[in-house]
Amino acid sequence: MSHPMPLNHANVEAIPADPGGSPDARLRAWLIDVALPRWLEIAADPRGGFHETVTFEGAPGDADKRLRTMARQTWAFATAATFGWHAERSRALAEHGFAFLTGPAAGSGSAFAKTFHPDGRVKDATRDAYDHAFVLFASAACHRAGIDGARELGETVRAVLKRDFALGADRGYREIAGPDVVSSDLTTGDAERRANPHMHLLEAFTAWHRATGCAASLADAHALADLFEAHFYDPATWSVREHVDADLNPLHGARGDIREPGHAAEWAWLLHDLDPDNAARRDIGIRLITMARRIGLNPHTGLPRHEITAAGVPLQGHSRIWSQTEMIRALCMLIWSSVDAGEVSAATQEAHAAVNLLFSHYIDPAPAGLWIDTLAPDGSAVSQTVPASILYHLMTPVVAYTR
């Protein structure tokens, strides 16, 4: 299957004629030499966990702490320690985050809360599948970094996911498990299924298998990939259904028509990461990337819009930084999975262009080591603070190349 990727000509003058080197080289250098040193200084909250946001001066924001951010930051610093990026200080912050995940976040040991006041007190005790996926993801990174107790935490989270969230064979996972939920047979209140939590569960199960060799986790990951192909992937439009009904059937109306180009790229990468030799899934990934870049980009900036319809009509025309990092990682998938030299060259050139767009729109306009999170359709900055959760997205393309 061949789908040449047209070079994005927005800001094309910034791309050297022969950029050379790995497409991630510029991002890697900035991450290791600029971003990580800054965040090693400003990320940790001495009261526990990490600051949810910082100001553009690097001062702590006053936002509530989300479990997913605490877990993402723990993953980021544990991964940096594993790769030897400021290893001693990165490990110390990973241990700091791990202490929060096994302390205030864990409650009774399995009831991981959703949000916390800035001082660490639980604000919302709701148990969310998306958040639990990131605790498992962080546990995998901490286990690889040799942090004591990480395997036990991961096994606890896996047990909770199977007991309180899994809905049985070919039915996926519920999004919310209330304090009264003790069996996966209960489905009260589940009117929809979203692709997004299932996507991060796939990511987490793949990471847990890679870190521990857990065969059951690998089987869970493949089951989620099969579920995606059967229910969330729309073969008619080469796109991801963000919302389906409780029985995993397509939704009618506006919600059923929502598509996110960034998620299409993210799914493409995760399917490849799970099983790079699976030709059928590789073809789905290529279709997802092709369509996302064909109809999902803002022609003024060349950046992915946040939400569009299946036909490409903008719903939320702003652009977030994480969508661009996922485009970069998806283009890496194209580079590594293509067998034609021309396609490899085109995807490599496109990846260099995508990295340059990331810098020109999101990184270069911000203070050193920080970033602009959200841009308006005209390319102007919308963000008033810097969300810490994005460090994970900035690291993943570099981790993919490094690994």
Image (cartoon, rainbow, N blue to C red):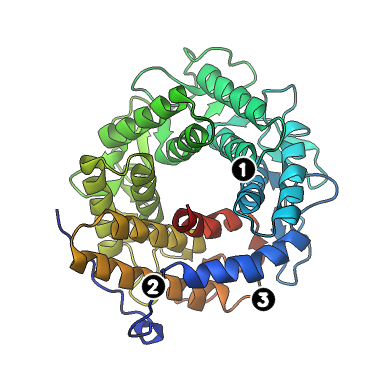
Residue 68 disc label: 1
Distance between the alpha carbons at the discs numbered 1 and 3: 25 Å
Between discs 2 and 3, the one toward the N terminus? 2
- The amino acid at mark 3 is Pro
**Residue located beneath label 2 in the image:** 352
Is the residue marked by circle 3 packed among few (<14), some (14-19), or many (20+) residues within 10 Å?
A: few
- Residue 223 lies, in percent from the top left, at 35, 27
- The amino acid at mark 1 is Arg
Distance between the alpha carbons at the discs numbered 2 and 3: 23 Å
The residue most toward the left is 1
What is the quadrant of residue 88 in the picture? Answer: bottom right
Between discs 1 and 2, the one toward the N terminus? 1
Q: Does 4 sit left or right of 390 as displayed?
A: left
**Residue located beneath label 3 in the image:** 367
The mark lying in front, picked from 2 and 3, is 2
In the depicted view, which residue is nearer to us: 289 or 236?
A: 289
Element carrying mark 1 = helix
- Residue 173 lies, in percent from the top left, at 45, 26
Q: Does 63 sit left or right of 202 as displayed?
A: right
The mark lying in front, picked from 1 and 2, is 2
